[in-house]
């Protein structure tokens, strides 16, 4: 059934070919006589078939399934001491946003209730260009070495031989890369099956930088907290929904917004000075760690409200293209190597998925005029008219430096290579706190049964024993409970280096 909006919008449009010519009868293919061959001159038919043949574009290599919506960001508290980004310039200022929520591993038609992290991407159209916050619904991630990303994702997707999802590579990867354990703990808790798409929090995960007009910066983590809390469903409900209504997340969001029940989030920032970062127990460029709230409190600064459903899913959700490299003065990436790799990877995949001129698509086009030396390519709708296509002295462009252009920031000094691959006791502290202090008895039970239901399918005895040793390094009781649930003997903890051997964050501000 068309939505109320679609019914009301009936415009009695005249049917035409793509070149605009009216055609009386779209179904009547031109042919010779009653049973003769078709005529090549029938542009209406050929136009229609040829366009249909080309309807599909590649789905996103990850995060293929998702729901999107439009709304606004509003500044609720002054943070101009932290960032000179134009969108934060005054309390009450509103910026249009487009958000897309997604699962990660499944294909375009997969179930919204799958056990998976959720993508939580926000495009803010500011007066200084687009700022994309390409976040997840978890404050941490599986990796801290970007080279592992394709390996990790391949193990969560289909087996190259059988085209089946397979528990052995899935757990083989986790057992060989124990820095993933913190995120595994969240994934197999009920947070791994959020209720729909718009009842969850979002987190920057990575450390970013806020820079103020004087060029002074602080490291930040951004938290986008859902009004009404983070709602989850249990494993059994998720499984039932996957069969009965795999698109329930898209449907819930659409129906709530159509009914005027607009989802709202409050935004907070945790800040850390470079000096604090050097003393911090964990490396701030290690994406597998959180910043404790007690030490680095949440400071409120804004809210997001989603109040407008897309009018066309493909144009406004499938074609939206987020990238952490779409940023604005006042908001900068940190040296986190995973983040740095993402700065490359997203525009690269967009050029493949949507084409060279993906920024010109209406949903991606910045609100501000674009002026540069990029020209032509497929579908160049905004080709900048008569403007010279080189840096011309005859018709020069105006150049606007960032307020802090001359201020030098930081130089990475730590031995990143060692740091990324080296597992120490530090890697187990936060997952242990989750198990021992955060999960209550019910959450513990759900966790053990969620893991056992999936991990119990592993066939390789080596993978089973190795992953149990990773769980035992978090907590022996946790590992023993999972072992018991899958009928495996108890396994001793993985042996890891002491915390003192971890490489700490260092920077050199004057460099
Ligand atoms: C989507 C790469 C880590 C959040 C994607 C896509 C790629 C990608 C290629 C598909 C984009 C598209 O076709 O539109 C990577 C790489 C990573 C990484 C190479 C690490 C080296 C992360 C992390 C987060 C994240 C750590 C969150 C903190 C997202 C989100 C989307 C996405 C939210 C979906 C965006 C949308 O809704 O269109 N990623 N990713 N990714 N990624 Fe990542």
Image: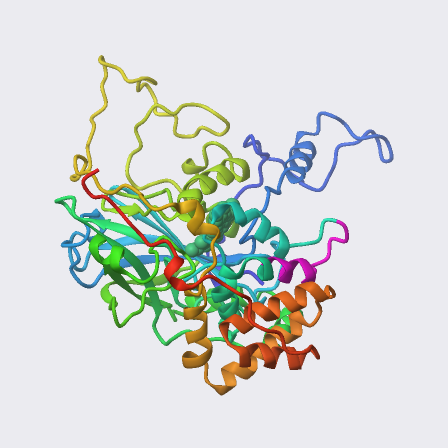
- The quarter of the picture where the N terminus appears is bottom right
In this view, 239 is above or below 503 = below
Left or right: where does residue 144 sit relative to residue 95? Answer: right
In this view, 432 is above or below 67 = below
Q: Return the residue nearer the eye: 30 or 157.
A: 157
Residue 235 lies in quadrant: bottom right
In this view, 11 is above or below 406 = below
Q: Does the rendering let one see residue 395? A: yes
x 49%, y 64%: residue: 183
Left or right: where does residue 404 sit relative to residue 378? Answer: left
Left or right: where does residue 107 sit relative to residue 299? Answer: right
Which residue range is magenta in the image? 161-173
Q: Return the residue nearer the eye: 42 or 119.
A: 119
Query: Which residue ends up furthest to the top in the rendered image?
Result: 394
In this view, 213 is above or below 448 = above
Q: Determine if the magenta segment contains residue 165.
A: yes
x 31%, y 52%: residue: 505
x 74%, y 26%: residue: 40
Q: Does the rendering let one see residue 234? A: no
Q: Position of residue 310 (x, y in %)?
A: 45, 55
Residue 69 lies in quadrant: bottom left
Q: Position of residue 285 (x, y in %)?
A: 36, 52
Residue 176 lies in quadrant: bottom right
Q: Determine if the magenta segment contains residue 391.
A: no
- The quarter of the picture where the C terminus appears is top left
Colouring scheme applied when the structure was drawn: rainbow
Q: Position of residue 466 (x, y in %)?
A: 62, 65
């Amino acid at each position: 059934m068309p939505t109320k909006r679609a019914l009301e919008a009936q415009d009695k449009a005249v049917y035409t070919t793509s070149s605009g010519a009216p055609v009386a009868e779209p179904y009547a293919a031109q042919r010779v006589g009653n049973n003769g061959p078709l005529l090549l001159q029938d542009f209406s038919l050929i136009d229609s078939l040829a366009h249909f043949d080309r309807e599909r574009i590649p789905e996103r290599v990850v995060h293929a399934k998702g729901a999107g919506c439009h709304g606004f960001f509003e500044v609720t508290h002054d943070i101009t001491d932290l960032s000179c980004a134009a969108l934060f310039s005054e309390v009450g200022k509103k910026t249009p946003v487009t958000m897309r929520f997604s699962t990660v591993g499944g294909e375009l038609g997969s179930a919204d209730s799958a056990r998976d992290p959720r993508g939580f991407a926000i495009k803010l159209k500011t007066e200084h260009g687009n700022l994309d916050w390409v976040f997840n619904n978890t404050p941490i991630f599986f990796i801290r070495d970007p080279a592992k990303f394709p390996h990790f994702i391949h193990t969560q997707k289909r087996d190259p031989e059988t085209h089946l999802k397979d528990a052995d590579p899935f757990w083989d990867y986790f057992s060989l890369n124990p820095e993933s354990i913190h995120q595994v703990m969240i994934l197999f808790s009920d947070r791994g099956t959020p209720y729909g798409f718009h009842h969850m929090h979002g987190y920057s995960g990575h450390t970013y930088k806020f820079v103020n007009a004087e060029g002074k910066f602080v490291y930040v983590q951004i938290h986008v907290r859902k009004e009404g809390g983070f709602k989850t469903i249990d494993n059994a409900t998720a499984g039932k929904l996957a069969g009965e209504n795999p698109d329930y997340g898209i449907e819930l969001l659409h129906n709530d917004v159509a009914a005027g029940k607009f989802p709202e989030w409050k935004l907070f920032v945790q800040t850390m000075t470079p000096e604090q970062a050097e003393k911090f127990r964990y490396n701030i460029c290690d994406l597998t760690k959180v910043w404790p709230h007690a030490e680095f409190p949440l400071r409120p600064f804004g809210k997001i409200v989603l109040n407008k459903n897309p009018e066309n899913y493909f144009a406004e959700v499938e074609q939206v293209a987020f990238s952490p490299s779409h940023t604005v003065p006042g908001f900068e990436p940190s040296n986190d190597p995973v983040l740095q790799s993402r700065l490359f990877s997203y525009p690269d995949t967009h050029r493949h998925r949507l084409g060279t001129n993906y920024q010109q698509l209406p949903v991606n086009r910045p609100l501000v005029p674009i002026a540069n030396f990029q020209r032509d390519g497929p579908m160049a709708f905004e080709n900048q008219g008569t403007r010279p296509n080189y840096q011309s002295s005859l018709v020069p462009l105006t150049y606007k430096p960032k307020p802090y252009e001359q201020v030098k920031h930081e130089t990475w000094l730590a031995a990143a290579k060692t740091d990324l691959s080296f597992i120490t006791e530090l890697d187990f502290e936060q997952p242990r706190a989750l198990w021992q202090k955060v999960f209550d008895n019910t959450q513990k039970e759900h966790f053990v049964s969620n893991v056992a239901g999936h991990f119990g399918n592993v066939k390789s005895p080596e993978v089973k024993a190795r992953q149990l040793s990773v769980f035992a390094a978090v907590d022996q009781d946790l590992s023993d409970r999972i072992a018991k649930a899958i009928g495996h003997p108890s396994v001793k903890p993985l042996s890891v280096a002491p915390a003192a051997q971890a490489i700490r964050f260092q920077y050199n501000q004057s460099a």
